[in-house]
Amino acid sequence: MKICLYGSGSRKTDEIYITETYKLGVEMAKRGHTLVFGGGDTGMMGACAKGVHDAGGKSIGIAPEWIGQFEPLCEECNEFIYVDTMDERKKKFLENSDAFIISPGGIGTLDEFFEVITLKKLKQHSKPIIVYNINHFYDTMLNMIDEMGEKGFLYKQMELYQVASSPDEIFEYLDG
């Protein structure tokens, strides 16, 4: 299975998030899955890719060439797809992935999450989406989404994604 990881590329990320996402990458490789990601060598993306590569797994990076001005790109990818725009990057994520994991991140990660979940809601894909809620990172966002549903702004939102707090929970859902 090709699993897309959305997550921060920040170098300022707390070590707990880096460690847990590295473990996710190791587990991904052990189970024979391929990582699809934004191609960054730092933050959540870099940690997961390092775990995948250290465990002998495969990865596909997808990014515009100019993104290298903002963050270093992972040189260990088995394949790298260069695109012109961020919109094209998100389209390639969708085309090249069988499932999505949303790890902790910032504005870009939220953009990717809300786009992929909106497309699922609009029946443009039926791929699994898992929010990787390390150390309760996404609790506030998940509560906000619940409140939106309670107030009538969303319908059946919980059927669109799952929430997991460990690699075991993630793969129990994906492989089960």
Image (spheres, rainbow, N blue to C red):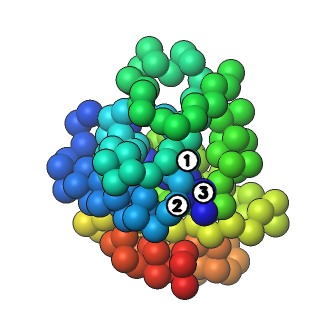
C-alpha distance separating marks 2 and 3? 6 Å
* Residue 24 occupies quadrant: bottom left
Up-down: is 148 above or below 63? below
The residue shown at (49%, 48%) is: 58
Q: Is residue 149 above or below residue 13?
A: below
- Residue bearing mark 1: 36
Of tags 2 and 1, the one toward the viewer is 2
Numbered label attached to residue 2:
3
What residue is at 31 percent from the left and 64 percent from the top?
134
Q: Are marks 2 and 3 in contact (CB under 8 Å)?
A: yes
- Disc sitting over residue 33 in the figure: 2
> From where the camera sits, is residue 102 visible?
yes
Identified by mark 1, the residue type is Val
The residue sitting at the front extreme is 56
Q: Position of residue 77 (x, y in %)?
A: 48, 36
Asked whether residue 110 is in view, the answer is: no
Instruction: Using residue 43 as the reference point, say whether residue 94 is left or right of it.
Output: right
The x and y percentages for residue 117 are 65, 61
Q: Amino acid at mark 3?
A: Lys
What residue sits 26% from the left and 33% below the top?
11
Q: Are marks 3 and 1 in contact (CB under 8 Å)?
A: yes
In this view, the residue in front, 22 or 126, is 22
Residue 111 position, x and y percent, is 57, 45
Q: Amino acid at mark 2?
A: His
Label 2: which secondary element? loop
Q: Earlier in the sequence, mark 2 or mark 3?
A: 3
Is residue 151 left or right of 84 when viewed as pictured?
Answer: left
Q: Residue furthest left?
A: 15
The numbered mark, 3 or 1, whose residue comes first in the sequence reads 3
Crowd rating for badge 1 (residues with CA inside 10 Å; few <14, some 14–19, many 20+):
many
